Image (cartoon, rainbow, N blue to C red):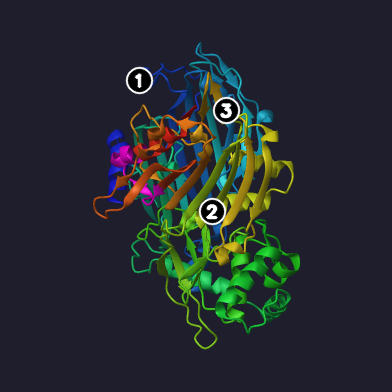
Amino acid sequence: MKKIAALIFTLFVAALNLTAQQYRTPKPIDSNWVSKPKIHPTPRNYVGYPAITLSQSDDFEYKYEGRGNFGDEATTGKADYKYQYNGVSVYHTLHKLIKIMDERGIERYNKIAIPFYHAANIRWDDLKARTISPDGKVYDIPPSMFKISEDENGTPEIIFAMEGVEKYAEVEYFIKEQMEYSVFEHLFFSQEMPILDYNFEMGFPKELRMEFKGYNGFPDLMDTLIAGRRHTKLHLKNIPELKTEPFSFPYLHLMRAEWRVNYYSYYAHDYSIEKQFTWDEMAKELYTNAYKISDTEKKAVITFLTSIGVTGSETELDKIIKIENGIKRNIIVYPVVKDNSCNLDTIISRKSATSFGIMKLFAACFKQTDVKCELGRATDRQYYILDEKFENWYNLHQYLIYFPHFKTFISPTNVLLRYPMVENGVLTNKGIFCKMGSYKDPTIRLADKKTIYNPTSADNYINLVANVSFEKNLEANVSMKYSYYGYPSVSPRTTVNVIPPGDRLNRYIESLFGIHKQDNLLKYSINNEGLENYTSNYPLEIAATIKATELVERAGNKYILKIGNVIGSHIEYYQEKERKLPVDISYPHVINRTINVTIPQGYKIANLKDLKINGDYVDPRTKTVAVGFKSDYVIKGNKLVITIKETYNQTHFHVSDYQIFRNAINAGADFNKVSLVLTH
C-alpha cells in the first residue's frame, strides 16, 4: 500500500497546482455561459491528444426544501435525525468546455452521452450545449435534440448530437440535475484526457455536518460557515490524463472525492451529538433489515425450504449447499423495486428479488435451519480498497455471507457461482460483517471487519495437455484438453453455462483453441461444466481434436512446425511510454502445459534449443517464483515432450517493478513465436 501511495503522489500531487481560496459570495452557476463565446488558443503542449478539457466545474447544492425541517425540536420537544434528511434536495451542476484536437476527437464528440447521476431529474431549462467553430461561429443545440436513452448496462443517460464539430473547435455543455439525496456521495473524474482547469464547489445547510475525503490527488476538503450555510471550494489546474494499461485496475487510480454526513447538528455549536452512519450502525442496520420478518414471511420461508428439499436433518454444510442451490435456481435477481418487493412471501411467489431481497431470503433460510453465518458487504478492489477510517457505505456494493464454522464465504447475488466461490473482485479485500444472533441470543453484534480469501496458486491453476501427430503428407492433427481449477474456471464455466449449444458454443470452442477455419474443429467435449462442481472442486474440462492445417508449412525439403501456436495467442507487451500504473491481476494462478509431439519417421528437429526459455523471477525474500514463464523439453524415442510452466504467484507489482513482470510476459510471447524445423 505504501508503494501505491507513492505512485499516486508521483502521478497526481506533483502535477496539480492546488489553489486554496477563501469562499466568496458565489456567482450564479451559469454565469460563465456567455452569450457570445470566444474561441481559445490551442495549447501547444497537448498536440497529439484527441481532445482536452479546457475547463470543468462541478457544483453541488444541498437545500432543505421539504417537511421535517431542521429545528423541529422546537415544536416536538426532540430532534429525530432519522427523518430529518427526507426534505433535503440536492442539485448538481456540470459545466464542461472541450477543445477538439484531431479526427479522433471529432469522432468522440460528434455525439455526447452523459449518465444520469443516480436517478437524477434533469432540469431541461438548464440543459445547454453548443459547438464553437475555430472561426467563432456558434452552433447551439436546440432542446429537441436532447434525448433520454440507456447505455448497455441499462443506466439512464442523456444523448445529444453536436453540430459543427471540427479540428480545433470547442464543445461546451451545461447540465443541472436534481439528485436523489444520499448520506454518502462521491465524484469520479473522467481522466481519459487532461483537464486544464477544474473548479469544485459545494454548499449545504449548517445543520448537515459533512466529512470529506480525497483520493489519488484530490485533497481533503474543509467547509466554512458563512451566512447560515456551509461552503467548500477547490480549484485545481493541470489534472493529467490516466490511460488504461494492460494488467492494471485503472479505475482504482482515478482521482475522486467522497463525502458523507457525519451527523445533524441542531444548534450552532453542538458537537456533543454522537457520530452517525458508522460501520457499527451499518452492521446493525443490515442485521435488522435482514432478520426482521413477519409470521407470514416465516411461513413462506418454511414452505420454500421444504420445496427445495431441506429437511433440517442435514449437516450444516449440506444445508448451506442446498439452500444456495435452491435460491439461485428458483429466484432471479431483479433490480426493480415494486410494492412489497422486500417481503419474503412476495419474493418467493414472484420468484424474483432485488439484491437485498436475495440477501434477506438467504438470511431467513439460514436462521430457520440454524446455520451459523454473518452477513456482510465488501468493495470490489478493482474500484475501491476499503478505507476503514472513512465510513462510506456506498462503496460496499458486494453482498457476502460468511460461515464461521468453515471460514468460508458465498456471493448470494451471483447466480453463476456456488459455495465456496465468491466474486474475484472481493478477494484479498476487507468487508464489513455483522454476526447473526439466535433465538436464545438475539443480540446484534458490532461491525466485524474481515479479509475475504487470500487465494494461492495451489488452488487456482490451468492444465493443458496437447498431443501433436502427423499424417503422411505431414498435415498436423492436435488433440488438446484444458483442465481449469478454482478461479480460472469461472470465466469459461460461466460461458459454457450461458451460451446455448449450437453455433455460438462452437465458435467459443474454436476461439479457445485458436481455430481459424470452421471445418478444422473435428470434435470436442465438455465435462464438469455444472455449477455444483465449484463445491465438489471438480475441474472444468474442455477437450478438442483439431485438424491443424495452419500449424505446418513447407519450406523446400524442410517443414516448419509452428509449435508456439499450440499454446494459443500470448500477449506481447513492449511499452514505449513510461508505465504509469502498478501491475495488478485478479488472483494468483499457474498454467501448466505439456505438449507431446510425435516426430515423423525419418525426420529430426534441427533447433530444439529454441524451446528452452526462462523468464522466471525468483523473489529473494521467499525464494519462490513470483512471476515467470519457463519452458523445457526432453526426447523420449520418437516423442518430443515440451513442458511449460507460467506462474503468477504475486498479484501486485509496484510500477518500479514493472520490468520484472514484463519480462515474464514477453518470455511467453517469445515461446509463442517458436517454430521447429523438421529435416530429413
Q: Mark 3: which secondary structure?
A: strand
- Image location (x, y in percent) of residue 304: 71, 75
Q: Residue furthest top?
A: 135
Residue 350 on image: x %, y %? 75, 65
Residue 350, placed above or below residue 116: below
Tell me where residue 612 sits by quadrant: top left
Return the mark for residue 583.
none
Answer whether residue 658 is magenta in the image: yes
Confirm whether residue 221 shows in the render.
no
Q: Nearer the viewer, residue 346 or 228?
A: 346
Region in magenta: 647-662
| Residue at the extreme front of the image, as rendered | 602
Which residue carries the number 2 mark?
Answer: 484
Q: Is residue 444 visible?
A: yes
The residue under label 1 is 45
Q: In screen coordinates, is 268 left or right of 189?
A: left
Residue 129 is tagged as 3
In this rendering, which labeled residue sits more in front, label 2 or label 1? 2
Label 1 is placed on what type of residue?
A: Asn
Q: Residue furthest bottom?
A: 440
Viewer-nearest residue: 259 or 523: 523
In the displayed structure image, the side of residue 75 where residue 504 appears, left or right: right
**Residue type, numbered disc 2:** Tyr
